[in-house]
């Protein structure tokens, strides 16, 4: 639980309910030996190329 934030499980439930895609960094997944079957429903592993393409196609990008 972060400071002044709801529990992550609640945030994740809201994100999934809203149909917002969850992207997992491919390099991070490899380093941690995480594969697609290990992910939560709706999450996908993406490459740096996917991130660059998404940013280039949009006027705004939010990251944290």
Image (cartoon, grey):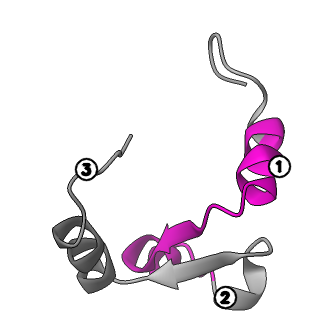
Residue 45 appears left or right of 61: right
For marks 3 and 2 on the same chain, the one whose residue lies earlier in the sequence = 2
Query: Residue 32 colored magenta?
Result: yes
CA distance separating discs 3 and 1: 24 Å
**Eye-nearest disc, 3 or 1:** 3
CA distance separating discs 2 and 1: 19 Å
Mark 3, residue position: 60
Q: Residue at x 35, y 46 (%)?
A: 63
Q: Quadrant of residue 28?
A: bottom left
Mark 1, residue position: 13
Of helix, strand and loop, which one carries label 1?
helix
Magenta segment boundaries in residue numbering? 9-34
Residue 19 image offset from top left, x and y in percent: 71, 63
Q: Of the numbered discs in the image, which one, if any, rests on residue 36? A: 2
Q: Residue at x 60, y 68 (%)?
A: 21
Furthest-front residue in this view: 59
**Eye-nearest disc, 2 or 1:** 1
């Amino acid at each position: 639980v972060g400071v002044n934030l709801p529990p992550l499980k609640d945030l994740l439930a809201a994100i999934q309910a809203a149909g917002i895609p969850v992207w997992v960094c491919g390099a991070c997944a490899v380093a941690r030996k995480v594969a697609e079957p290990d992910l939560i429903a709706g999450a996908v592993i993406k490459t740096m190329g996917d991130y660059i393409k998404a940013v280039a196609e949009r006027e705004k990008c939010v990251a944290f």
